[in-house]
């Protein structure tokens, strides 16, 4: 075992699910109860550096230049412990991570964050893992992170209770389809309830959770076929049902998790109005108030303008299909 281990740096891009993951089939292994399909986004990047240091007493984590909270540290230490045990090392680590977009604001920063951390920590521990193993490692910390290991269009199957190795896989490269996700920011600040907590609330208290579990695989199949056929209308219809249905579970759980801000509804209307005017655009939301509108590249500036003029929308970002993880030299 080397005493000195070189620091390692990795970047990962956030992904937005087109067919949503919501709910777990195995809480301790963090296995998703339904299949999901996502698009990795080039503009939303997390950069992470990990260095295992001999003599260090505790793992230390700096996020966007500030010391991390205890809750954030616990999730990172859990991943580092897995890496240490696989590599046979005991050194504590210094971790620095930087998001080029708002953390915990419903923009799936845990996805790119844990994908970058899994990659950088594995390299810093002196190990080489294939993409599937990195994806499974990231998935243990945050299931959406399994998808950010890969670029383009990515699928994560539902997990069967007890399995350990569930990983995502790419179903089409970023060059397959030149779509845009136009992100309308509808509120400032971090989200009120973590997705982990909100999905457990849905599972244990929403009367609609079983219906969600029954219907979600069908939407995922439709999204997958629509990506293959480059059929935006079929993709958009399944995508909207998927997002509204998981929000239905969240809203009807006890206590209710209502992620929507007033401007969320306004932005949803803007997207529906554009469609009524003949623009091919559909919306999706994650565990937060922002609205993401999916359209073809040639319609992105019109969608952007309409969302910018929507009451309560703070700013708008146009995102393009992105690449998977990269290890810095
Ligand atoms: C609504 O991956 O953040 O964005 O596995 O508990 O960390 P954990 O949950 P997380 O959930 C993402 C939920 C979602 C939908 C999705 O990305 O598929």
Image (cartoon, grey):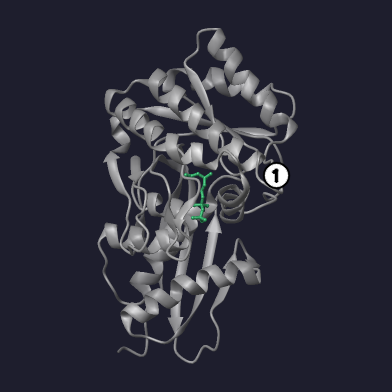
Does residue 92 lie above or below 291 as drawn?
A: below
Give the percent coordinates (x, y) of residue 274.
57, 14
In the rendered structure, the answer to whether residue 245 lies left or right of residue 129 reads right
Q: Nearer the viewer, residue 175 or 145?
A: 145
How many numbered circles does the render carry? 1
The image shows residue 6 at horizontal and vertical percentages of 37, 78
Element on which disc 1 rests: loop
Image coordinates of residue 293 in percent, x first then y, are 53, 27
Disc 1 Cβ-to-ligand 1 distance below 8 Å: no
Question: Between 70 and 167, which is closer to the camera in this rendering?
Answer: 167
Residue shown at 32% from the left, 37% from the top: 174
Residue for point 59% across, 37% down: 247
Answer whether residue 318 is visible to the viewer in this image: no
- The residue shown at (34%, 42%) is 154
Q: Label 1 belongs to which residue?
A: 256
| 139 with respect to 61 (left or right) | left
Q: Quadrant of residue 220?
A: top left
Residue 188: image location, x then y, percent: 72, 43
Of the 4 image quadrants, the one containing the C terminus is: bottom left
Tell me what residue is drawn at x 69 percent, y 22 percent.
310
Residue 74 picture quarter: bottom right
Figure check: 239 above or below 159:
above
- Residue 106 is drawn in which quadrant? top right
Q: Nearer the viewer, residue 56 or 144?
A: 144
Quadrant position of the N terminus in the picture: bottom left
Considering only vertical position in the picture, is 129 above or below 255? below
Is residue 217 at least partly visible in the picture? yes
How many residues crowd mark 1 within 10 Å: few (<14), some (14–19), many (20+)?
some
């Amino acid at each position: 075992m080397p005493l000195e281990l070189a620091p390692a740096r990795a970047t990962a891009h956030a992904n937005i699910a087109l067919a949503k993951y919501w709910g777990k089939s195995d809480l301790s292994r963090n296995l998703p109860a339904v299949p999901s399909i996502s698009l990795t986004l080039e503009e939303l990047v997390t950069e992470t550096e990990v260095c295992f240091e001999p003599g260090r007493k505790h793992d230390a984590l700096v996020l966007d230049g500030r010391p991390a909270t205890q809750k954030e540290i616990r999730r990172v230490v859990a991943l580092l412990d897995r890496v240490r045990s696989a590599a046979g090392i005991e050194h504590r680590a210094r971790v620095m991570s930087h998001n080029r977009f708002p953390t915990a604001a419903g923009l799936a920063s845990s996805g790119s964050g844990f994908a970058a951390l899994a990659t950088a920590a594995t390299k810093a521990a002196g190990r080489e893992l294939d993409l599937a193993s990195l994806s499974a490692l990231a998935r243990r910390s945050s299931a959406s992170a399994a998808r950010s290991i890969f670029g383009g269009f990515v699928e994560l199957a539902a997990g069967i209770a007890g399995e350990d190795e569930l990983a995502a896989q790419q179903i089409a490269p970023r060059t397959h389809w030149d779509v845009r996700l136009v992100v309308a920011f509808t509120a400032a600040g971090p989200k009120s309830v973590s997705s982990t907590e909100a999905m457990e609330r849905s599972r244990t208290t929403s009367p609609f959770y079983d219906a969600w579990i029954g219907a979600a695989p069908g939407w995922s199949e439709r999204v997958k076929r629509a990506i293959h056929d480059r059929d935006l209308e079929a993709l958009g219809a399944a995508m909207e049902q998927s997002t509204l249905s998981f929000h239905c579970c969240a809203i009807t759980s006890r206590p209710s998790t209502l992620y929507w801000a007033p401007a969320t509804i306004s932005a949803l209307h803007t997207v529906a109005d554009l469609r009524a005017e003949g623009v091919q655009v559909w919306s999706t939301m994650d565990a937060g108030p922002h609205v993401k509108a999916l359209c073809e590249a040639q319609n992105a500036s019109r969608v952007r303008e309409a969302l910018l003029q929507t009451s309560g929308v703070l700013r708008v970002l146009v995102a393009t299909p992105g690449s998977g993880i990269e290890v810095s030299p």
